[in-house]
């Protein structure tokens, strides 16, 4: 799938021209008592000549789990080995197409529109028309259902051919994961820190498409995982003497492991401060031994942790910022870069608010001036406040 290249020049792999990598490590980091399943993966990119920089992401295209594919084919009433010919995947078996080429764990509205013409007058058609007429109800309905759920809800709707069903599906897309390694130390590997998505809806267990496949089904040591690196503006300072503050709860720790590896390799003189958060120290302290090692070697100047469920009241990374407001302000005024990686919906907003609060308290600023300093000066003009949120 990948093209041959001059071995002295990095290759620009893409979605249409990925490198077929192999998985060499699938290590669960969370303890038995954890509410989560977070893993360390090592993807071998030997012979790819692929280049990446700390802060970049790796795009990984997974496959649908065999059980989900079998359930769906059963609902459709076709044979798994029937040969199909579709513009998106060419000629192959229906089972192979649904495994490799289409998203089937999240449904698109297109299937609802297609089924309307398949139904005759009655309760099922009335229900379908009601959903199609109400955008918010339709969105809510689709959010928790996959195609198997929908076909079970509307059993009278029958697709005449496998190809007509494939027409209503979306294409399989790569998932982006922050790279947790520095290529200077791991020239032929990419390390990933991934929280495996697991949940239950409508009486059936579900997993995230890429994370579940990597954790449960991806074969080890087989060159068949399509990957490519994507560049980011989430970068270390060009001047290694600059200090950095890294806020990375959960899997947001990933790029900062890469940052620390790179800073140590470069013998960078700037100080490094990491603020990490998770639920429990005993079961969710990812890379604990490595981080302590960075501390002992003087690479990690300061490590603050916020384990939210280890005490009666919850403590988060934003609380640690406020707790260390004076020191944080000193670092910022001395030119430190401030990085945030992780959840965009809540954490990043809370960290942003905490930064404004620190500017108000320690900088003696009004709310308006503090917002201007954080939003305009620090982020846009000086470009010392960088976020990788999702």
Image (cartoon, grey):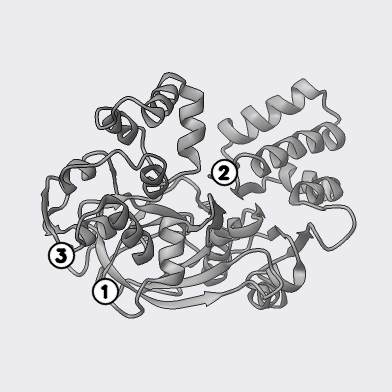
Circle 1: is it few (<14), some (14-19), or many (20+) Cα within 10 Å?
some
Question: Which quadrant holds residue 35?
Answer: bottom right
Residue 387 numbered tag: 2
Q: Where is residue 323 shown, x and y percent of the image?
A: 86, 49
Work out whether mark 3 precedes mark 2 in sequence or the reverse, and give the earlier one: 3
Q: Nearer the viewer, residue 85 or 300?
A: 85
Residue found at x 67% / y 72%:
291
Q: Are marks 3 and 2 in contact (CB under 8 Å)?
A: no
Q: Nearer the viewer, mark 2 or mark 1?
A: 1
Q: CA distance from mark 3 to mark 2?
A: 34 Å
245, above or below 7, in the image:
above
Alpha carbons under labels 2 and 1: distance apart:
33 Å
Q: Quadrant of residue 372?
A: top right
First along the sequence among labels 1 and 3: 3
Residue closest to the eye, 237 or 89: 89
Q: Badge 1 is on which residue? A: 223
Name the side, left or right, on which 14 lies relative to 370. left
Q: Which residue is mark 3?
A: 5
Per the rendering, the mark at residue 95 is none
């Amino acid at each position: 799938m990948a093209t041959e290249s001059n071995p002295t020049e990095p290759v620009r792999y893409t979605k249409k021209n990925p490198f077929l990598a192999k998985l060499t490590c699938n290590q669960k980091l969370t303890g038995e008592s954890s509410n989560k399943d977070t893993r360390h993966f090592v993807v071998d990119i030997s012979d790819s000549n692929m280049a990446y920089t700390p802060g970049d992401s790796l795009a990984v295209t997974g496959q649908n789990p065999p059980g989900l594919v079998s359930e769906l084919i059963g609902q459709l009433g076709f044979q798994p080995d029937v040969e199909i010919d579709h513009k998106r995947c060419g000629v192959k078996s229906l089972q192979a197409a649904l495994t490799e080429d289409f998203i089937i764990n999240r449904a698109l509205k297109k299937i609802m529109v297609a089924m309307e013409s398949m139904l005759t007058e009655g309760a099922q058609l009335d229900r379908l028309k009601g959903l199609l007429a109400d955008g918010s109800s339709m969105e809510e309905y689709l959010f928790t259902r996959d195609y198997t759920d929908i076909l079970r809800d509307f059993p009278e709707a029958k697709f005449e051919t496998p190809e007509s069903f494939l027409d209503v599906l979306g294409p399989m897309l790569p998932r982006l994961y922050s790279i947790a390694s520095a290529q200077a130390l791991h020239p032929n590997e990419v390390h990933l820190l991934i929280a495996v998505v697991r949940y239950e809806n409508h009486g059936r267990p579900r997993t995230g498409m890429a994370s579940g496949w990597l954790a449960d089904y991806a074969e080890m040591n087989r060159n068949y995982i399509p990957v490519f690196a994507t560049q980011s503006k989430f970068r270390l300072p060009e001047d290694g003497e600059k200090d950095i503050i890294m806020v990375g709860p959960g899997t947001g720790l990933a790029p900062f492991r890469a940052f620390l590896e790179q800073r140590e390799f470069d013998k960078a003189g700037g100080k490094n401060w990491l603020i990490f958060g998770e639920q429990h120290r005993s079961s969710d302290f990812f890379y604990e031994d490595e981080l302590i090692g960075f501390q002992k070697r003087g690479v990690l100047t300061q490590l603050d942790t916020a384990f939210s469920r280890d005490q009666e009241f919850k403590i988060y990374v934003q609380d640690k910022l406020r707790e260390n407001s004076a020191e944080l302000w000193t670092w910022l005024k001395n030119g430190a870069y401030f990085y945030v990686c992780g959840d965009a919906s809540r954490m990043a907003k809370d960290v942003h608010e905490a930064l404004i609060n620190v500017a108000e308290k320690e900088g003696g600023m009004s709310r308006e001036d503090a917002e201007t300093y954080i939003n305009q000066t620090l982020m846009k003009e000086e470009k010392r406040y960088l976020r990788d949120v999702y």
